[in-house]
Amino acid sequence: MPKAFDAANPPFDRLSAAEIAELRSVLDIGYFRPGEAIIEAGHSAEVLYVVIKGAVEEHDAGDIEAVLGPKEVFDSRALVHGTAGSRFVAAEETLCYLIPKELTLDLIKRNPSFAAFFYSDISRKLDAMAKAEEADGVESVMRSRIGDANVRAAIFVDAIASIERVAHTMRDRDANAVFVRGGDGRIGLVTGTDLWRSTILERKPLDAPIGSIARYNLISSSEDEFVFEALIQMTKHNIRRVAVKRGGELVGMMEDVDLLGLFAGNSQLIPGRIDRARTTDDLAAPARDIQAQVERLHKQGVKVEDIAEITSDLNRRLIAKLFDLVAPESIREFGALMIMGSEGRGEQTVRTDQDNGLLLSVPVGEDTINHFRAEFSGALQRFGFPPCPGNVMVSNPIWSCTIDTFEAQLKRWVYDPDPESSINLGIFFDAIGVAGRSDLVPRAKMRMIELMRGEAVLIANFAKAIDQFPGTGGVLATVMATVGREEIIDIKKSGTFPIVHGVRSLAIDKGLMAPSTVDRIHALAKLGQFGEEFERELISSFRFFMSLRVRSQLRAARLGTTEGESLIRASELSNLDRDLLRESLKMVKRFRELVRNHFKLTMF
Amino acid sequence: MNIIRKVRRLIDRMSLRDRQFDFLFDENTTGEVVSVDCETTGFDPWVDDVISIAAIKIRGNKILTSDTFEAVIKPDAKMTAESIKVHQLRSVDVEAGRPMDEVLPEFLRFLGPRPILGYWIDFDCRMLSKYLINTLGIALPNQQVEVSKIYYDRKYGHAAQNTQIDLRFAKIIEDLGLRELSQHDAFNDALTVAEMYVILKDMEKRGVYLKRQREISEPSNAVV
């Protein structure tokens, strides 16, 4: 029995020790010469293959879909569903473990998490993976340092200050507890609860010194201790706060709600801070936190669509608040602030750029609008929103003008296009109003749909951009064939963009107002553009690409660059991820074909 | 089969003390070979003992790891410190083993008339024959297949006279791109040899040779 069979290799890592022993006892090893077909397309397989050494190419109708290397498993379809979708050919001298079909099917029946690997659809595979990752999230939070958590800054009051004054301080500083510095050097703690207890229940006068009600048995943790150690302190002493020390010095306080916030990425605290902002500078900290929590949420294994939703929601609040703070009365009354592109679709997680604009129902003074343009775009840039390389920003008069001017512009983009027009139309079609008048953005979008409705050639030209990144036929095949080797894949070009833009083109054609890609896919399926299975798989592929993108973006962000932010190295992916990537890329291929047929792009 | 070997076989068959092992001389109709590796207490067949045997059948291009033979043997000779270091088998492990006269018949039944494959297989055969002669009166009669010989042919078959030859086990692993299993474990070694065999046999069929690094510097490179 080959002890060398790697039980840690997914999906076999989900098997129990007894199941692994069982599997090892029935394994054989097969040798395949270069060029030998291991499984023919359309045939079934009697064994599941795990590559030991060598390389296996997956051919589909002449294209090489993928190259499988050591530890990769094939072909679940031939084994479980009876027919191989592709032809598997040894590319070099290849050795594979051969796992009998009977045992594999038996294990699938007995072990649901092992079975997940064999699901034919991407969506179910992803769900099964997500479940496995959930537990890790809690674990990673507990292992972070107290200093990395959102520790509240220490607030000190003098022991001789009156209870009433301390109550005011606490309200003004938005604090639930403060440290009390006694004349003798002792430091104590007073909480909101202590205040009402002493004054209401014990009828202490409001001018009594705070020192008389402070508690001096301070429990503290050091900044570089683990979060779980703070949690243990709280549980042990039945308290809700732990003082945080840095080298013996009190620097802050950690509350149980902060711990809760860590798990939830403290997104629930950010809206309050946005709402309370009184100046644009007050918004800088929450703007930073929105970005910081993307990484935290990702580490905790939160699904990418949920991260995108939380982040978009917070970004919109932030931008709306900024508008309120910066825009003068006239612009607030007659203007509508819109966000566009990935922000409009609600699909941005790590900030890549800002796409925003302003529509006005009536002209406002030249000075007023110029001042607003500079203030607004400048503030966002200070908050860490990189400027839009295409200059799609409030600061650009093309994107901040009256609705009449804008509609005339739309007409020009449609009927008298220049190279930028198609890009501009695409960006605007994803627009959504976030502040000010709510009627202007939908009106302009309706106008765009009317202009383009029935203009088959026009929309077809627009849709053609799905092929703008080399990705048709053979070229796509080479991208896919590199999966599994030391090669790099551009997630945006070969994954997200073709889906986003194809869906957008179909949405324009059907006059759909929904801005998010997933909502559009749902709506298109309802209109019968594709079946339910296609709908589900397209959404799952899209989300999978988004999750890969977040990963590469966070890595780029850690390196302090946007260079290569959408590149993924195949060798950095786990086998399961590579498997999903292959399936998702196949889905993109199917979708491109659907779009091409829909718009008869081959005719142009 | 040449005439001398035929006669030798005939004599062996007649000297076989126990007729129930007649099958060792049958014609091999299975088409299979068996990869065998023994771990021993040392390298002197006269003094040292076999402490474990592993054997794996190979049928065509398939290594039948689902049908294998593995046994640990309790030796007569005291284990030397040296062999403990090599095999990481301590006396206590081997104590759990079974006596050779119990293991050997089982092994021979597993082997049958199949050719016996290995790396430096002559040594393994001599070690095993030591026991066979005592009990059956003959040496192991099975045809021997030496994996390093097949490797030699694939790599140095065409080589010039003064080519440096490297037949180390690790070198073959490297040349064939095999994974390195922990060595000096009878099963792993037998498995690695089996993997070498199926690949090299196929190369032989296809008439493919392994690449050699240029061992001799070519003076033609020195053109100025």
Image (tube, grey):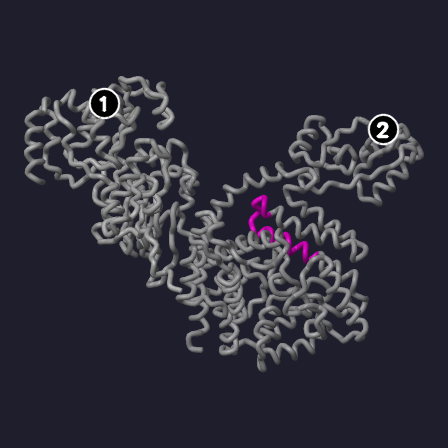
Q: Which residues are magenta?
A: A298-317
Q: How many marks?
A: 2
Is the stretch drawn in magenta largely helix, strand or loop? Answer: helix
Pointer 1 local density, CA inside 10 Å: few below 14, some 14–19, many at least 20: few
**Disc 1, SS:** loop
Pointer 2 local density, CA inside 10 Å: few below 14, some 14–19, many at least 20: few
Amino acid under label 2? Arg
The residue that appears at 22% across and 39% down in the rendered structure is: B146
In this rendering, the answer to whether A309 lies above or below A336 is above
Q: Chain of mark 1?
A: B
The residue that appears at 25% across and 43% down in the rendered structure is: B197
**Disc 2, SS:** loop
In the picture of the structure, the residue carrying the numbered disc 1 is B46
Where residue A225 sits in the image (x, y, percent)? Answer: 68, 34
Would residue A340 appear left or right of A401 to someone viewing this image? left
Amino acid under label 1? Trp
The residue that appears at 45% across and 78% down in the rendered structure is: A604
Would residue B196 appear left or right of A485 to someone viewing this image? left
In the picture of the structure, the residue carrying the numbered disc 2 is A186
Would residue B114 appear left or right of A574 to someone viewing this image? left
- Whether residue A523 is visible, yes or no, is no
